[in-house]
Image (cartoon, rainbow, N blue to C red):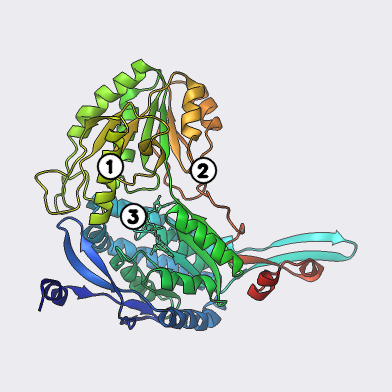
Amino acid sequence: MNTRDATLAKVRDLSHFVGGKHVKGESGRFGDVFNPTSGALAARVPLASTAEAERAIANARQAFGGWSETSPVTRARVMFRYKELIERHMDELGLLIASEHGKVLSDAKGSIQRGLEVVEFACGIPHLMKGEYSDNITAGMDLYSIRQPLGVCAGITPFNFPAMVPMWMFPMAIACGNTFILKPSEKDPSCPLRLAELMLEAGAPPGVLNVVNGDKEAVDTLLTDPRVAAVSFVGSTPIAKYVFATGSVNGKRVQALGGAKNHMVVMPDADIDQAVDGLIGAGYGSAGERCMAISVAVPVGEETANRLVEKLIPKIESLRIGPYTDDKADMGPVVTKDAQNRIKGLISRGVEEGAKLLVGGGAPAQLPKGFYVEPTLFADVDPGSTLAQEEIFGPVLCVIPFDDDDDAVRIANDTIYGLSGAVHSASVERALGVARRIRSGTLSVNGDYEQTPAGTLEIQLASPTLFDKLNITGEAALAGAEIPLPHELAQA
Ligand code: NAD
C-alpha cells in the first residue's frame, strides 16, 4: 500500500443525499476534502456522474407532485421546525464548517445565523404567497393572480459559506412548494449534507431537499436537464457567466452571483478608529474569503492615509491566527493549499509591481502545517496593478491614497465587479454624496460591509420571481404569462 492509499484507507467517504437517504457515489470519481488547520486529508467526496445527477432530478421531480400540493401553512410549519433544529444543532454545524473551511467558530456560527434569517423569512410564506386581485379591469371582467411553485430548482454554491449561501436559496424555494437539488462546493460538503438531513427531520418529505456532490459534470446536468426549472448560482465570475448562459439557453430561470472587489473610501473627517475597526473585520474576517470582504481602502488625502495606516498596523499585527479549536483566534487558515499558493503568488506579484508591503506577506512560522496566510497590508498600491484589480480572496488589504472625493469615486468604480463597499465620513451628507456615485450593489455608510445578497446582482436576475411563478388567470394568460419551454427557447 503506498502512502496515498494508506491515508485514503483512514479517511471518511462522504455520500450524496437523495430521496431522503444517503447514497454512495458510483462514478468512481472523488474530490479531496481537507482540514485546512492541519493540512490533513479529512474525507473524500464523490463526484456525481450525469446518471447520478439525473436520478436526483427524477427523485426531486417525483417529490414535487405531493409537496407542491401541500398548503403554504403546512410548509411554514416545516420551516418553523427547521429553524428550531438548526438552532439546536448550531455547535455541530459550526464545527462541520470550521473543520472543512477553516474559519473560526464565531465566524462559522455567525454565517449560519445569517442563513437562519432566511429560514425565519420563509416561515412567513403563507403571507408571501398571496396573490392579487384587480376589480373591473375592463367592462365586466375582474382579474386575479396566484403564485405557483415552478418545479425542481437547483442551487450551485461556493466553498466560502457552505451553510449560509445554500440557505439563501433552498428555504425560500422549498417554502414556495418547489423541490430542490443542492450542488455544494466539493471543498466543504459535510455541513450541506447535514442541513439536508435536518430538513427531513423537520418534516419535509424525502426528495424535497437533495444534495448532489460533484463538479462540472453534475452542474452541466442540472443546467441542461429540462426537468430543472430554475437555477441559482453563487461563485466566481467566470463560472457565474457560464451558468447564466447555459441555464438560460436551456430555458431556466437563472440567478448568478459572481466575484467581488470592494472598496472603503475614508474621508479626512472620518472617525479613523471606526474605519479601522471596519477594515479589520471586513478585510481579515474569515481570512478574507468573503465576497463582501473589503480589500481596498481609499483614504482621501495623504494625511488621512498616514493616520489610517498608522492605526491599522498595530491592530493587524495583534490579530491572533490559529485553528478553530483556539477560541481566542481571530482568523483561521484559507481553504486549501491551492488557495494559499494563489494568495501568496498575488502577494509576490504586488511586491514586484512596486506596492509597499507593510505587514505580513507570508505564512506564519508557528503554524507550518495548515493553509495559513498572515494578515497582510500593502500601501502605495497602483490602482491599475494586479493587487488593486483582481479579487484576492485572502487576508490582504491594500491602501490606495487619493486626492479628493472625485478621485476616490473613480477608484472605487474602477473595477469589473461592483458588489459592495463602504464610505466613512463625519458628514453623512458628504458620505451619501460619494456613496450615490459608487456603482456597487450594496454600500454602507460608516460601517464595514453589508451582508445581504439582495443588491449584489452583477449578472442580471432572469426573473423577479425566481422560485415561484406569477400565474395570471383569465384573458391575460393569453398574453403569454407562461414561461417558454426549453425547446421553444432553443428555436427562438
Ligand atoms: P467557484 O466558481 O470556483 O465554484 C462555485 C461552484 O461552481 C462550486 O459548486 C463548484 O463546484 C462549481 N464549479 C466550479 N467550476 C465549475 C465549472 N467549470 N463548471 C461548472 N461548475 C463549476 O467559486 P468558489 O471558489 O467556490 O467561491 C469563491 C467565489 O465565490 C469568489 O469569487 C466569491 O467572490 C464568490 N462569492 C460571491 C458571492 C456573492 O454574493 N456574489 C457570495 C459568496 C462567494
Disc 2 packing (10 Å; few <14; some 14–19; many ≥20): some
Q: Do the residues labelled 2 and 1 touch (CB within 8 Å)?
A: no
Report ligand 1 position as a quadrant: bottom left
Question: How far separated are the C-alphas under marks 3 and 2?
Answer: 20 Å
491 shown above or below 138 = below
Q: Is mark 3 on a helix, strand or loop?
A: loop
Q: Quadrant of residue 166?
A: bottom left
Which residue lies at the image location 66% right of the left edge and 75% below the top edge?
487
Q: Sequence order check: which comes first, mark 2 or mark 1? A: 1
Residue occupying the point 49% across, 83% down: 58
* Number of the label disc, if any, that sits on residue 362: none
Q: How crowded is mark 1: few (under 14 residues within 10 Å), some or many (20 or more)?
A: many
Q: Where is residue 189 in the image (x, y as percent from the top left)?
A: 31, 67
Q: Is 383 placed left or right of 481 in the picture?
A: left
The location of residue 171, given as percent across then percent down, is 46, 64
Amino acid type of the residue that numbered disc 3 sits on in the rendered structure: Asn
Q: Where is residue 98 in the image (x, y as percent from the top left)?
A: 24, 57
The answer to whether 360 appears left or right of 269 in the picture is left
| Badge 3 residue CB within 8 Å of ligand 1 | yes
Residue in the image at 46% along x and 26% along y: 408
Q: Please name the residue that numbered disc 3 is placed on.
A: 160
- Which amino acid is tagged 1? Pro
Under circle 2, the secondary element is loop
Residue 325, picture quadrant: bottom left
**What residue does disc 1 label?**
395
Characterize the local packing of mark 3: few (<14), some (14-19) or many (20 or more) Cα atoms within 10 angstroms.
many
Q: Can residue 15 be seen here?
A: yes
- Who is closer to the viewer here, 143 or 292? 292
Q: Is the CB of the residue bearing disc 1 within 8 angstroms of ligand 1?
A: no
Locate residue 45 relative to residue 401 in the image: left or right: left
The mark that comes first in sequence, 3 or 2, is 3
Q: Name the residue under label 2.
A: 441
